[in-house]
């Protein structure tokens, strides 16, 4: 198949590489010339595990341009993967998508034959049958359903494992304006996925609602587990690790994302939850569950701050290990580690930070509030209390010598209960894995 991909960012670049590596002819479009040049030079425009490997495997089937017409005329299906930022009312705006559809439609006027436009960006339910369809029909002069297909097909990926998640998805969610467009997209996924996932085909609005429902169900689960951790820290003998492990064994519940650690962050979860609540409000439905999930999430920074202060016991130096919102990505959007570092610095504490990939991104936000260091070991050596806020694997390797103190004890607040048990019991270390009094 010949595919064009509009937007070569964190999602668009990996999708382009996955499709091209599976034998499709892919032409990417971006307004960022650096990204276009990177793709044309065979280099990954964004940092993501395995992306470079797949670009290498694409063997000339992957090119990029800034020219919409070239991309549309050279493809049969167009994936639109552009930002849909949240506006001041908490809902996703389609302005970049609509702008792009004008260029896509204008180019389609010069193209013969059937073409599918597939929206991958996260949009508010009702967008595709509403302003997206209207913009596309107006600019192309075609009618959706006849010689033009419109699909809504978001990806369920997490940064840091985008390629893996695209190759082995739990399902493909496919909203379609008509069966022909859905079949075309289904045939692509039959070649690009390595695990033969279920393909859930439905109308456009059901797919739009499913996308944010999946994310908001997961955020509810995270907040639920964090609420349990908070309870366990106050209930003698209770341990969130033990409780969530057993609760998750129930097949109606499942263990994924039921950890009891810190709040959710990143470019999707927080804003999806807010938008979901706004949607419910706008329809006159009760958004209580989504709003409670957010309230609990916002409370996590206060909870960690209180725990850190208790462990400091009057001392002043905190080390934060982990600034990316999750491991294996440099992304710091809505990161709990960054928020915590800023919060503790605002309280007058000295804060040292380290992250394997996200340090420079985080420092753009944190500026001179905190001190950046070049290794996890240096961060630990300088601090009275260390907080492990992101579950980077390399933190498990910090040598015991880094925790040694001439006098007093360093305290570690391990939000992910990551440190090896041998380390937890070294003499100079006061260890607290979140979610149990007994571990302190
Ligand atoms: N990043 C994630 O984890 C994730 C997960 C699920 C869904 N999404 C959704 O996917 C969409 C894209 O997210 P992303 O993280 O890839 O964004 P991104 O900001 O990383 O990438 C967007 C790209 O689009 C380009 N661009 C902007 N305007 C353009 C235009 N008019 N024409 C061509 N290119 C243009 C930008 O230069 C950028 O390279 C959003 O709706 C997001 O909500 C993202």
Image (spheres, rainbow, N blue to C red):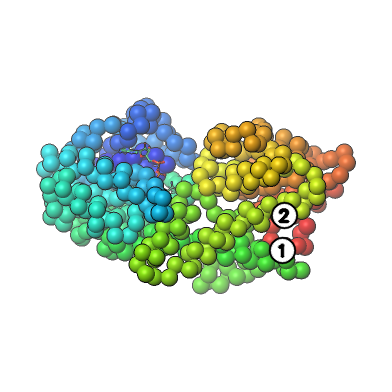
Q: Residue at x 48, y 64 (%)?
A: 290
Task: Report whether residue 396 is seen.
Answer: no
Between marks 1 and 2, how big is the CA–CA gap? 10 Å
- Counting the numbered discs, the total is 2
Residue of label 2: 307
Q: Quadrant of residue 105?
A: top left
Q: Residue at x 53, y 70 (%)?
A: 253
| 129, 3: nearer the viewer | 129
Q: Position of residue 342 (x, y in %)?
A: 62, 43
Which one is in front, 178 or 291? 291
Q: Is residue 375 above or below residue 154?
A: above
Q: Quadrant of the N terminus?
A: top left
Q: Is residue 201 left or right of residue 140?
A: right
Residue 414 coordinates in the image, percent (x, y): 69, 51
The answer to whether residue 355 is visible is yes
Kindly identify the residue that appears in the image at 22 percent across and 58 percent down.
177
Cβ–Cβ under 8 Å for marks 1 and 2: yes
Residue 189 pos. (x, y %): 32, 52
**Nearer the N terminus, badge 1 or badge 2?**
1
- Write down the residue under mark 1: 233
User: Disc 1 on helix, strand or loop?
Assistant: loop
């Amino acid at each position: 198949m010949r595919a064009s991909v509009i937007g070569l960012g964190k999602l668009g670049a990996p999708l382009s590489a996955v499709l091209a590596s599976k034998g499709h002819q892919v032409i990417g479009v971006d307004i960022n010339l650096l990204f276009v040049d990177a793709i044309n030079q065979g280099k990954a425009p964004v940092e993501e595990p395995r992306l470079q490997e797949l670009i290498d495997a694409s063997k000339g089937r992957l090119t990029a341009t800034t020219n919409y017409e070239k991309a549309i005329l050279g493809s049969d299906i167009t994936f639109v993967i552009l930002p849909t930022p949240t506006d001041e009312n908490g809902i996703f705006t389609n302005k970049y998508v609509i702008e792009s559809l004008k260029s896509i439609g204008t180019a389609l006027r010069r193209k013969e034959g059937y073409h599918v436009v597939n929206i991958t960006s996260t949009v508010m339910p009702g967008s595709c049958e509403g302003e997206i369809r209207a913009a596309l029909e107006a600019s192309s002069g075609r009618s959706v359903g006849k010689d033009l297909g419109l699909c809504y097909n978001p990806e369920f990926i997490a940064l840091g494992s985008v390629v893996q998640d695209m190759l082995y998805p739990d399902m493909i969610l496919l909203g379609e304006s008509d069966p022909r467009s859905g079949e075309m997209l289904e045939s692509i996924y039959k070649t690009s996925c390595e695990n033969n996932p279920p393909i859930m085909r439905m109308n456009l609005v059901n797919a739009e609602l499913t996308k944010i429902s999946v994310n908001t169900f997961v955020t509810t689960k995270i907040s639920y587990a964090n609420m349990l951790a908070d309870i366990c820290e106050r209930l003698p003998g209770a341990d969130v690790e033990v409780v969530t492990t057993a609760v998750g064994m129930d097949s109606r519940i499942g263990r994924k994302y039921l950890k009891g650690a810190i709040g959710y962050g990143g470019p999707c979860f927080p804003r999806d939850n807010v938008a979901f609540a706004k949607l419910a409000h706008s329809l006159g439905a009760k958004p209580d569950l989504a709003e409670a999930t957010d309230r609990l999430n916002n409370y996590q920074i206060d909870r960690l701050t209180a725990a850190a202060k208790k462990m400091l016991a009057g001392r002043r130096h905190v080390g934060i290990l982990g600034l990316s919102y999750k491991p294996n990505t440099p992304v710091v959007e809505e990161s709990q580690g960054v928020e915590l570092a800023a919060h503790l610095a605002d309280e007058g504490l000295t804060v040292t930070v380290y992250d394997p990939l996200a340090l420079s991104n985080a420092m753009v936000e944190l500026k001179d509030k905190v001190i950046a260091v070049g290794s996890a070991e240096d961060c630990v050596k300088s601090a009275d209390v260390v907080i492990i806020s992101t579950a980077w694997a390399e933190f498990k390797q910090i040598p015991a010598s880094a925790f040694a103190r001439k006098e007093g004890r360093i305290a570690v607040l391990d939000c992910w209960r990551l440190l090896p048990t041998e380390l937890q019991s070294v003499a100079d270390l006061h260890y607290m894995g979140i979610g149990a009094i007994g571990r302190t």
